[in-house]
Amino acid sequence: DTAVSQTPKYLVTQMGNDKSIKCEQNLGHDTMYWYKQDSKKFLKIMFSYNNKELIINETVPNRFSPKSPDKAHLNLHINSLELGDSAVYFCASSPGGRNTGELFFGEGSRLTVL
Amino acid sequence: GQSLEQPSEVTAVEGAIVQINCTYQTSGFYGLSWYQQHDGGAPTFLSYNALDGLEETGRFSSFLSRSDSYGYLLLQELQMKDSASYFCAVRDWRSQGNLIFGKGTKLSVKP
């Protein structure tokens, strides 16, 4: 069983569209995250979500919104896509809040905006 | 804010030992992690140091000096499969416990 799974793995879309990426973890972890990895491989935290507490990186545009229907899921919704949104988006989870340096990453979702 | 510095690229030969350094500036430091990422893959956890000293896990070791705001990842008996990007990452008060990653070091292992 995949511990952290994301869908879709690849997403190609036009500028201005709205899209979502889904993430599920079956590890029973309390905290989930979204990271963006750009073409230079820079991994940047976007959001973390723990027991209904959302922490947003202040640099993330409000076109990006996380949605968590339950503890095992943290989906990413993106409105009005722009060329600069093209990147690989990684979902991750960790146990016991943030008292660990270990994250479990999904396989990534490569978003291409044309 | 936080900043992490690590070399952008390192090249070594099979069987050798390589050390990847990481220096950081943070507020209220919690710990330093290391991750490996192969091209097209996901980052995978290697180690976490919260206290000073050396942590050994097989061929990989990680070191931390909190007073020097410095750590390193040591890879021994290099194998071709170790060719990947290696990221250091810090947790601190300012990031509210979230992991902040360095820009990564691309390791190329040659035969």
Image: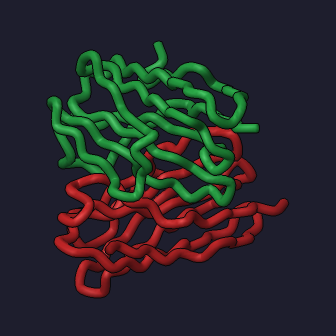
Chain colours: A green, B red
- Work out whether B111 lies above or below B12: above
Please tell me which residue is depicted at 51% across the width and 60% down the height of the picture: B87
- In this view, the residue in front, A58 or A87, is A58
Q: How many marks?
A: 0
Please tell me which residue is depicted at 34% across the width and 17% down the height of the picture: A26
In this rendering, would A4 be left or right of A47?
A: right
Please tell me which residue is depicted at 33% across the width and 79% down the height of the picture: B25
- In this view, the residue in front, B27 or B14, is B27
In this rendering, would B75 be left or right of B26?
A: right
Q: Seen from this angle, which residue lies furthest right? A: B111
- In this view, the residue in front, A56 or B45, is A56
Please tell me which residue is depicted at 54% across the width and 39% down the height of the picture: A89
Horizontal and vertical percent position of residue B104? 57, 64
Q: Quadrant of residue A69?
A: top left
Horizontal and vertical percent position of residue A3? 42, 22
Q: Quadrant of residue B71?
A: bottom left
- Work out whether A49 lies above or below B97: above
Horizontal and vertical percent position of residue A57? 34, 53
Task: Name the quadrant of the C terminus of chain A.
Answer: top right
Horizontal and vertical percent position of residue A32? 31, 34
